[in-house]
Image (spheres, rainbow, N blue to C red):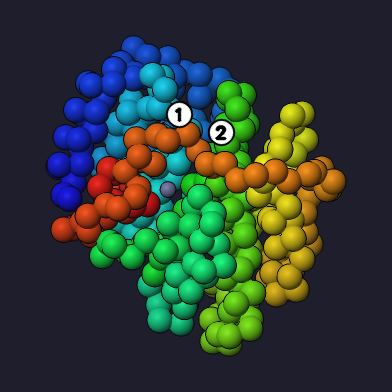
Amino acid sequence: MNRAFGLCFLALWSAWSNACDDNQARAAIGRLAQKSPTGYALYQKTAQYSSARSIFLSMLKGGYGGQCDLTTAVHEGAHILAGPENSNRYHLITGETVPRIGEEAVFFKPKELYSKFKTFPESNYLGDTKKDAPSSVDEFGYLLDEFNSYTWDAQVSLDLGDGIEANGMLQFMQFVAAYIERAAQAHPATYNRLTTAPSRTPVAKLWTQAHDVLAKVCARSGFSSPYLKGACSAGQNSSLTKLVGEKAHCPASCRGFASGSPTPSRPPSIVDFARPNRPAPSNSGTQFMMSIPGISR
Ligand SMILES: [Zn+2]
């Protein structure tokens, strides 16, 4: 699917669903500015890159549930900013950026982890091999990109107070921890790279970021997640601790939570609807291509 078709699809979707008109979108951005300063800062950054602002707004307008979808817009905005064609860096919630991990043979393919997580709702990020564009299935750098976007989901949903979306982040914490553990056990070259600069910095910072967001999530009354226990257990592996330090461990505010049964980590937004069984894209040139309908991302 090409980019123009993707945008066209979005426009048609928006018109059909009437989810969020221009006035509502403006109001939603205002709400983001008021309630989520970090999410708004990301929105402002989208003005720096060609097409990034319009893609952000398209995602906002193509929202789920008949309303503007700020969380999905920020999630996709983080992808766009991090794209190799844009900053080629992960944009963190603090406003800091860290270098993106590129395509290098030393990083084994994340799909090696699929069998371990195949019952997880987000396992398609490890096991969907139907596409030929770069993705988290084959590249660790994309897995980290997705980890960052799902951490943004948790932060922005926390800020907005509409219901916490942390299940995705909790699953990706497990994926990343398992990647590091597997590297330590079976891929010494990968592990050596992960534990030395410059690759260590983005991994450690992304994990630390998720840890800090999770600490706030757990402090919010009423929070529970079937993936919390696994994320906290994942933090016990010594290779992760070696790489990220003390914050490998479960935040104090999360200890003692019970686990439940698996549920989808995000509402079925326009992006999620498109995930299963998509045709391979004909053009794999941009990060954006991975996040529009037609491409699993
Ligand atoms: Zn994503």
Q: Amino acid at mark 2?
A: Val
Whether residue 89 is visible here, answered yes or no, is no
> Residue 159 placed where, x, y %?
61, 28
Quick check: is the Cβ at mark 2 less than 8 Å away from ligand 1? no
Could you say where residue 108 lies in the image, as x and y percent from the top left? 47, 78
Q: Residue furthest top?
A: 23
Residues at circles 2 and 1 in contact by the CB criterion of under 8 Å: yes
Q: Secondary structure at mark 1?
A: helix
Residue annotated with mark 2: 156
Can residue 210 be seen by looking at this rendering?
Answer: yes
* Residue 96 marker: none
Distance of mark 2 from mark 1, alpha carbons? 8 Å
Q: Residues within 10 Å of mark 1 (few under 14, many from 20)?
A: many
Tell whether 270 sits left or right of 140: left
**x and y percentages locating residue 106 in the rendered image:** 46, 82
- 223 or 119, which lies in front? 119
Give the number of the disc on residue 70.
1
For image coordinates 34% across by 12% down, the residue present is 23
Q: Residue at x 50, y 24 (%)?
A: 32
Q: Secondary structure at mark 2?
A: helix
Residue 53: quarter of image: top left
